[in-house]
Amino acid sequence: MASDGFPYPVDQPGNFSADDKPTSLGDALPREMARVRDEVLPEYLSIPGGILAATMMRQSLDAAARAMAEGDVVAMIRCHEDLKGYEV
């Protein structure tokens, strides 16, 4: 903890690593979208029977992007929880 009581140096916002937990929905949702898009979706696209799951993931990613664009916090929470359910 920094000497001013904040958990990170306020004047140096770039001190976060990729392993830091997001502190807000505005950080967490894009990170979860990237995880599904970059890590999970390609795995499902590489297997013959994965097209159905891949289609569902794309729909979830579209819904998350729409919720963010509209600023719909309730939909963003719902989308975040939905995306967290996708695993390899």
Image: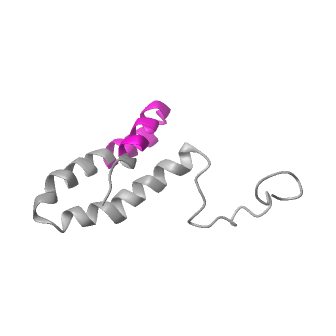
Residue drawn 68% across the image and 66% down it? 14
Which percent across, then down, holds residue 54? 21, 55
Q: Is residue 1 left or right of residue 77?
A: right
Quarter holding the C terminus is bottom left
The tally of labels here is 0
The answer to which of 88 and 73 lies nearer the viewer is 88
Identify the residue at image location x=28%, y=60%: 41
Q: Is the residue 45 above or below the residue 23 in the image?
A: below
Residue at screen point 52% across, 50% down:
28
**Residue 70 % position (x, y):** 44, 36
| Rendering coords of residue 43 (x, y %) | 25, 66
Q: Residue at x 70, y 66 (%)?
A: 15
Residue 26's place in the image compared with 8, above or below, is: above
Task: Give the quarter of the image for residue 44.
Answer: bottom left
Left or right side of 85 for 42: left
Q: How was this image coloured?
A: one colour
Q: 10 above or below 75?
A: below
Q: Quadrant of residue 2?
A: bottom right
User: Magenta stretch?
Assistant: 61-82
